[in-house]
Amino acid sequence: MQFYLPIAEVSVNAFVLFGLGGIVGILSGLFGVGGGFIITPLLFFIGIPPTVAVATGANQVVASSVSGVLAHLKRKTVDIRMGTVLLAGGMAGSAFGIWLFNYLSRLGQIDLTVQLAYVLFLGTVGAMMLQESLRALRRSKRSAPIKRHQHMWVHKLPFKMKFRTSGLYISVIPPLLVGFFVGVLAAVMGVGGGFLMVPAMIYILGMPTKVVVGTSLFQIIFVAAFTTFMHAWTNQSVDLMLALMLILGGVIGAQIGAQLALRLRAEHLRVLLALLVLSVAGKLAFDLLVRPDELYSIAVGSRA
Amino acid sequence: MKRFIIAAFLAFAGPVLAEEDVVAGLSQDRIDITANFDGSDILIYGAVKRDAPVPPGALDVIITLEGPGEAEVVRRKARVLGLWINTDKVVIDRAPSFYAVATTGAFSEIISDTEDLRHAISIPRAIRSVGAPQTIQDSQTFTEALIRIREARHLYSLDQYAVRLTDQTLFRADFDLPANLVEGNYKTRIFLLRDKRVVNLYEKTIFVRKVGLERWLFNLSRQQPAAYGLLALVIAALAGWGASAGFRLLRR
């Protein structure tokens, strides 16, 4: 069944879009990532112009995050207080990131910057997570007791706040900074930032893995909503028809993902997310290093 | 005096042009892009009208179908520090979004270069590229790349011998319009050729329009972008909530 997309001006198969939405939805519910870093390249691949893909991807992320958060709220695995603090930092970072994006665009190397940022951050985060989660997996097999409270520099800062759901009593400065940093990268790379937020929450803030996913999704809703609205308003590049089909698959996928997350062990979940992040980084690095079949490209959106 | 010259010119030029005229029709002069649009075919047919007997020599027909054009940026990648990155770019002043040429014979044998240049008929001629930056020597390769990429997407095509001409009078050609069609006015041109020269030209426009839901969404996104953005968010939030509520019911 072919569908003609009014904004993208291409015709695509509805089942392909439904499937893509579903896959990303499952990842979203499972790992607490919005899936922007996967959906956007996949949309490029099926021939959607990049500007439309980025904007519409963000719209789809909103839907799957709402669906995921509601599932997590039910289980009380969302730290709304922490989410709000992260979001405050995130909005400031996002605004700075949009400025940085425009500055880099003027310099003319935004594509390269974005691609390198993807490879660098996805690669580092993926490798770190893989290493850590494998170690944790080995440790838990030997059933050694896990240290609950690790006292790091993070715990010595002022402005302490109680985050009951996460079982933390820490300064608000680290979450604000984490939010800000992720917000900057999210705006520059055109993603929700879940794949950065999740490991930062686990390793920098020391939040329990169970709470991390719901909380990450909670703040992604707002970041992605902001991005979608800005794209629709300034670039008119959100394709509702495309979004609708992705969303349909996505919301269902997110529910399945949230169910799967209950059955899997936290360590396994982290190994899987690490492998996923690494494979995306690997693909992007491959594209940068290997001679492309076609050296020339028609810049879509050059008219805008 | 002036009027006399014009009259004399017309008396001289008129009969040459009017000797053979095109009378043509299209199977449809309006294409609606609906939600499930997946391409369309167009039959262009017609006849050559004459007041005099058929002149000697062979008659040839070239039919072109051209979509709305825009300036395009073509980029080229090069290896810098081991990475393949976009380095050079050339702005092509105007390239049609769709361009199909159908002929009765081998292109170079039925039309002269001068005539091709004058009427911008062949694919490279239909693309206008003047101002390449000084730093790029081989700007021609960028135009070639544009053609290559669009040919691969079935947006540009040259179909030789695709126009069927019967008894030097009746002609017809079929065009396949792909699903990834851009909205706009598509120009059809029918050229009659003798001795590699254009003796008559007939033009007609085909209107390609989005209709129904497609039209409504497109207009809303352009005319009220803020409302459109909010609509997108509301739909996303409702869909997310709906799926969550639906699954909860299923589990009970």
Image (cartoon, coloured by chain):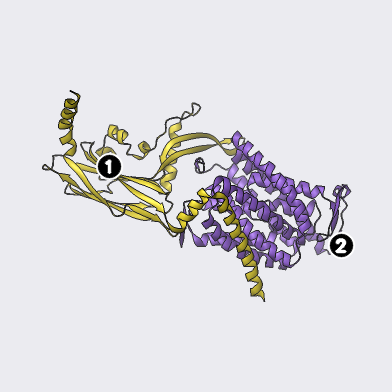
**Residue nearer the viewer, A209 or B107:** A209
Residues indicated by labels 2 and 1 sit on the same polypeptide chain:
no
- Please give the letter of the chain rendered in yellow: B
Secondary structure type for disc 1: loop
Q: Colour of chain A?
A: purple
Residue A174 at x, y = what percent?
A: 80, 48
Given the image, on which type of amino acid does mark 2 rest?
A: Pro
Q: What residue is pinned by disc 2?
A: A145
**Residue nearer the viewer, A73 or B128:** A73
Q: How many marks?
A: 2
Residue found at x 52% / y 57%: A241
**Badge 2: chain ID:** A
Q: What residue is pinned by disc 1?
A: B106
**Badge 1: chain ID:** B
Residue A160 at x, y = what percent?
A: 86, 51
Real-space CA distance between mark 2 and mark 1, rounded to the nearest whole angstrom = 82 Å
In the image: residue B150, left or right of residue B41: right
Q: Which mark is residue B90?
A: none
In the image: residue A280, left or right of residue B106: right
Residue found at x 19% / y 28%: B6
Position of the C terminus of chain B by quadrant: bottom right
B248 versus A23 height, above or below: below
